[in-house]
Amino acid sequence: MAVDVPEVGEVRKLLDKLGESALIERLDSFVALNEGLETKKGKEFIEVSILGFLEGTLVSLRRKYQGNEKVEGLLERISKRRTELDIKFRKPKPPIFENME
């Protein structure tokens, strides 16, 4: 029962193109570890986790490869998707805090 996160393949290709083989190994390990948790945590939770890992990896790559449009584009897209999925897992504010903003 593998989690299908298409962005993993895109980031893997980018890492290969940039010669970042050590990061490919870390990515593969992280994905494998999270797939083992899918039955306990749920598919969407694992997707958010993997997208967060991809986002962090791309933030590091953005610093290393400044101005790389492929890194910037993937980072923007993955950040947006992770944020959208992450909203599902946020706990609502208790009613006592509703009017405090």
Image (tube, rainbow, N blue to C red):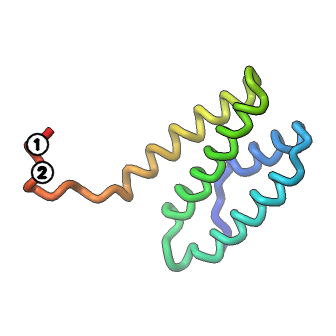
- Quadrant hosting residue 35: bottom right
Residue highlighted by disc 1: 100
In this picture, is 35 found above or below 99?
A: below
- At label 1, which amino acid type do we have? Met
Q: Which mark is residue 97?
A: 2
In this picture, is 77 found above or below 33?
A: above
Is 75 on the left-hand or right-hand side of 68?
left
In this picture, is 73 found above or below 94?
A: above
Decide: marks 2, 1 in contact (CB < 8 A)? yes
Rendered residue at 57%/73% (across/down):
38
Residue 76, image x, y percentages: 59, 32
The residue carrying pointer 2 sits among few (fewer than 14), some (14 to 19) or many (20 or more) residues within 10 Å by Cα, namely few
- At label 2, which amino acid type do we have? Phe
Rendered residue at 91%/42% (across/down):
19
Rendered residue at 15%/58% (across/down):
94
Say which of 100 and 91 sits in front: 100
- Quadrant hosting residue 17: top right
- Quadrant hosting residue 89: bottom left
